[in-house]
Amino acid sequence: MIACRTDGNSDSVRNSSETKDNMSITKGTVSASTETRADSALRTPVVLFFGTSLTAGYGLDPEQAFPALIERKAAEDGVPIKAINAGLSGETTAGAVRRIDWVLRTPADMVVIEAGANDALRGLSPDAARANLERLITAVRGKQPQAKIVLVQMEAPPNYGVAYTRSFRSVYTDVAKKENIPLLPFLLNGVAGIARLNQPDGVHPNLSGERIVADNLWKALKPIVAQLDRGSQRG
């Protein structure tokens, strides 16, 4: 998994272990060796996880962040992917709009957008978040029209009141419907607000919580990933 992860103000690119090829070449019949060569020619789709510190895996090692965990789950389930972690700590949806063109220099088969958590924590306008999410989707379609786009539901903390939390929640369903893209469940389902699953800040999952996040996301992503193009390697 390739990590483009920043836990501060500067970007850093880290290479973590890529999914190991678990195919073994078996000596035997011609048909068996031919099948092996055909399998090895298949390409591994690239899934770009674009988001905040929740995607970056704040406080965790890169290989413990949910994109890396999902990459391993995909390999175990026979639908391998190459996950790229493009999470940036502290980023609002407005910041994401400013950064997206740089991130999209990396070709991807799927772009998973996790954005808005910091807007909610700061009580920023849900309407502004909606507009920025639409700009992100427009940017992906403009730069990489072949890429599948998936949006992750985010929620606002309850301390801003019922009206704000409802308005913020509806942003994601509205955008997904308008843009005709899949909407994944709330990123922190079963993790948010549970002390034993979070770091001392009460916001970012610890490793136990991160594993739950990865499990939940993979259940929703797997059928989408299974449909990605795995045609012959581009030469």
Image: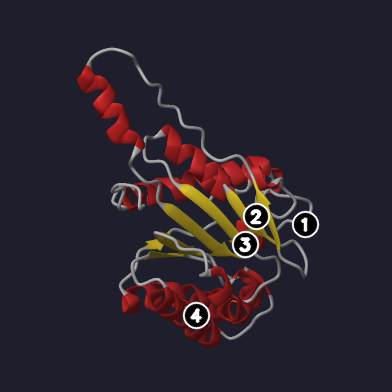
Q: Find out whether the residues at labels 2 and 4 contact each other: C-beta distance under 8 Å.
A: no
Left or right of 111? Residue 60 is right
Q: Which residue is mark 1?
A: 201
Left or right of 103? Residue 196 is right
Of 221 and 142, the residue lying toward us: 142
Structural distance between the alpha carbons of marks 2 and 1: 11 Å
Q: Position of residue 126 (x, y in %)?
A: 54, 83
Under circle 1, the secondary element is loop
Q: Which mark is residue 87?
A: 3
Q: Find out whether the residues at labels 3 and 1 contact each other: C-beta distance under 8 Å.
A: no
Q: Position of residue 203 (x, y in %)?
A: 70, 58
Q: Find out whether the residues at labels 2 and 1 contact each other: C-beta distance under 8 Å.
A: no
Q: For the residues carrying marks 2 and 3, which lies nearer the camera in this image?
A: 3
x 75%, y 61%: residue:
7
| Earlier sequence position, callout 4 versus callout 3 | 3
Badge 1 density bin: few <14, some 14–19, many ≥20, Cα 10 Å: few
